[in-house]
Image (cartoon, rainbow, N blue to C red):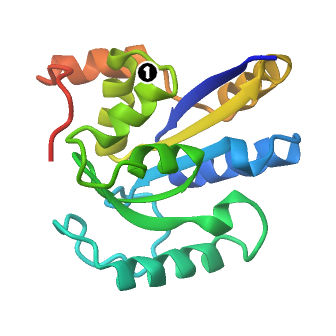
Amino acid sequence: MAARVLTALFDEYDTATGVVDQLEAAGVPHADISILANRAGSDTPRDQPFGDPKPDVVDPVDAAGTGATVGTVLGGGAGLLAGLGLLAIPGLGPVVAAGWLIAAVTGAGVGAAAGGLIGGLTGAGLTEGEAETYAEGVRRGGTLVTVRAEDHQADRVMAILDRAGSIDLDERAEGWRAEGWTGAAVRG
């Protein structure tokens, strides 16, 4: 069976983490789920020691400590959310992230490409336009949930993502374009 990549953007970080829990409870292995949130967003947990919202470089020691704290805050040692860590993605800056997509984004090295998230998403099968739009959503504070699902799981996964209130990406992009966003690749 072929695997499909299903991606949804959420305005609220807590909603997205709840979706990850729902997906895992529905039998989707956490190895097939990714979550990525711009840590500068207003809805990330307040008790995380994030510091400056847009530093140019993330100290690996600080990132490791932050990842450990995030995992503890979000529920201990179970599931994908326990593996959350802090990393810098070109064009987005520091993000909180976990899952398979993050390995794809950082596999060539964090500094390798100006559009690290865009490259990871297009490598997973999204069009460049879709990838640019999702990256813009994360840059604006959204939380991205991406799932690799076998064909027989895809409808159930999409139902969970939709039921949880994922945003209508086309509608949101229209609003951004009305504000002057051109859809160009996100740059750091």
Q: Is residue 12 visible?
A: no
Indicate the position of residue 144 as horizontal and vertical percent values.
Answer: 49, 41
Indicate the position of residue 179 as horizontal and vertical percent values.
Answer: 15, 24
Q: Residue at x 44, y 30 (%)?
A: 121
36 on left or right of 28 = left
118 on left or right of 147 = left
> Compared to 19, does 160 lie above or below?
above
Indicate the position of residue 34 as horizontal and vertical percent values.
Answer: 59, 46
Q: Residue at x 46, y 19 (%)?
A: 126
For the N terminus, give its image quadrant.
top right
Circle 1 SS class: helix
Determine the image quadrant of residue 23. Answer: top right
Q: Amino acid at mark 1?
A: Leu
Q: Is residue 64 visible?
A: yes
176 on left or right of 46 = left
Indicate the position of residue 70 as horizontal and vertical percent values.
Answer: 55, 74
